[in-house]
Image (cartoon, helix red, strand yellow):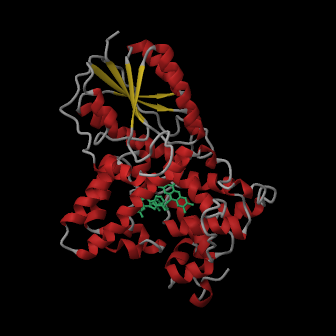
Amino acid sequence: MTRQRALIWFKRDLRIHDHAALVAAQSHADALALFVIEPEWMESPECDASHVDHALCCLAELRIALAQIGLPLLVRVGSAVAVLSQLHQEVGYTHLLNHEETGPGWSYGRDMQVALWCKSAGVEWQEFTQTGVVRRLRNRSGWAARWQARMNAPLHLLQGGFTAATSLDLPELPTLTSLGFSPHGKKLQAAGEKAARHTLKSFLQVRGYDYRKALSSPLSAEEGCSRLSPHLAFGTLSMRTVHQATEVAIGHTPDRALAYALRGFSGRLRWHCHFMQKLEDEPDIEFHNFARAFDGLREDEFNEAHFLAWCQGRTGYPMVDACMRSLVATGWLNFRMRAMLVSFASYHLWLHWRPTGLFLARQFLDYEPGIHWSQMQMQSGTSGINTLRMYSPTKQAKDQDPVGHFIRRWVPELARVPLPYLAEP
Ligand SMILES: Cc1cc2nc3c(=O)[nH]c(=O)nc-3n(C[C@H](O)[C@H](O)[C@H](O)COP(=O)(O)OP(=O)(O)OC[C@H]3O[C@@H](n4cnc5c(N)ncnc54)[C@H](O)[C@@H]3O)c2cc1C
């Protein structure tokens, strides 16, 4: 067995730029890379075929990019410990390197098992940060300054490539069908690191101009928001890369309007990590009310017919139905309309946030547990700290879709309804 052989375990960091584990592997004599397609992920109630499809597209591109720097990428299907241990027998490695993850319950359980296995196998496990999340945080004081320091730190850049001593048989990547999924039929954003960099550039140079104005309407947000969320969720861009590129764009543009718009965007990047930190600190928020005083509020009143109508975009509330159908077809929706969908489910239909949250998690290509469950609870009034916010679907339709383009596009059966009635249930 080669001493000092590193195994880089790719998870939600499917890129080669600013990748701490990849750079750390360069100080080892030999390295190889691994992605594990875990049954626990695919069978989890948050996972959708679209997520797996997107990951496979990212992996196809990543495998080529890694091969160009001399690193073979193994992709195996199985539980993490089983795959890690099998590979240890096959090729032997002394170090396991990966980024920290703030994931749902199943991934936390898996990490506990990996820690035990590494100890028993004599493998040194090293985890690196890639967001602003701080593990074992005692309190929040100084958190924002720490976030800034992490995001302003130099990017992790590779020095040359790798010389892989192990020659490995690299079977074709699995397909969606071979993994047991049916085609999802969604029209998703492009996957991979190249698409991510292109999306970032087009936003910072052109699309971001009207960001603050474009945010709220689903008509303008499609182009006017950054659309970086799936790239951050799958890690085809690091948060540090986005933060630093944004600061450079703000500093260099002579256009004050663009700088103002990008400052609004820049603040939201910190929210991303702020909400992930909440899940890191309180993993229970995925399953239980933040404020336990609200336990029992909706638990026994779940109306299955209402839930189905909401999931299918058939509630009879035009803006709600249009938003849901648009989300189901594309895997993305802007913030305000996400909030309206949840507010409608939680207040108008009095549905508990957990089943509605699982359904939405499957629809959002950018599913990020820390943001998602915090927002589900905030928009359902169970956080105990935020003011209750109920969105009127009629007001939202009138404000955000004043001439009815969005509703007519996604709810075509209403195409001929005159405008004065279009927003009404
Ligand atoms: C019920 C609900 C569930 C949500 N679930 C998710 C989720 O699973 N994953 C996710 O990335 N976002 C989630 N959001 C937050 C927000 O809607 C999305 O981040 C945003 O719409 C993504 O599009 P964008 O990248 O174009 O955003 P932009 O407006 O361009 O923002 C840039 C980035 O800032 C971060 N950001 C923006 N708004 C927020 C916010 N309110 N809270 C935390 N981070 C934010 C995201 O990383 C986003 O990609 C949720 C919001 C609600 C109301």
Image x and y of residue 180, in percent: 57, 37
| In-front residue for pair 260/63 | 260
- Quick one: quadrant of the C terminus? bottom right
Task: Identify the residue at image location x=53%, y=44%.
Answer: 280
> Residue 338: in sight, yes or no?
yes
Between 323 and 256, the one nearer to me in the picture = 256
- Residue at screen point 63% across, 51% down: 358
Going 49% across and 23% down the picture, which residue do you hit? 83
The residue at the far top in this view is: 1
Residue at the far right: name it: 300
Compared with 354, 254 (above or below) is below
Residue 19 pos. (x, y %): 31, 39
Displayed quadrant of residue 98: top left
How many numbered dots are placed on residues in this image? 0
Which is more toward the observer, 300 or 71? 300
Q: Is residue 332 above or below residue 320?
A: above
Q: Give the percent coordinates (x, y) of residue 192.
A: 35, 46
Res. 401 visible in picture: no
Classify residue 360 by image quadrant: bottom right
Residue 255: percent from the left, percent from the top? Answer: 21, 74
Q: Is residue 159 left or right of residue 94?
A: left
Give the left or right position of residue 168, taking residue 384 as reference: left
* Quadrant showing the N terminus: top left
Depth check: give the residue in front, 56 or 215: 215
Residue drawn at x 26%, y 60% as measured from the top left:
247
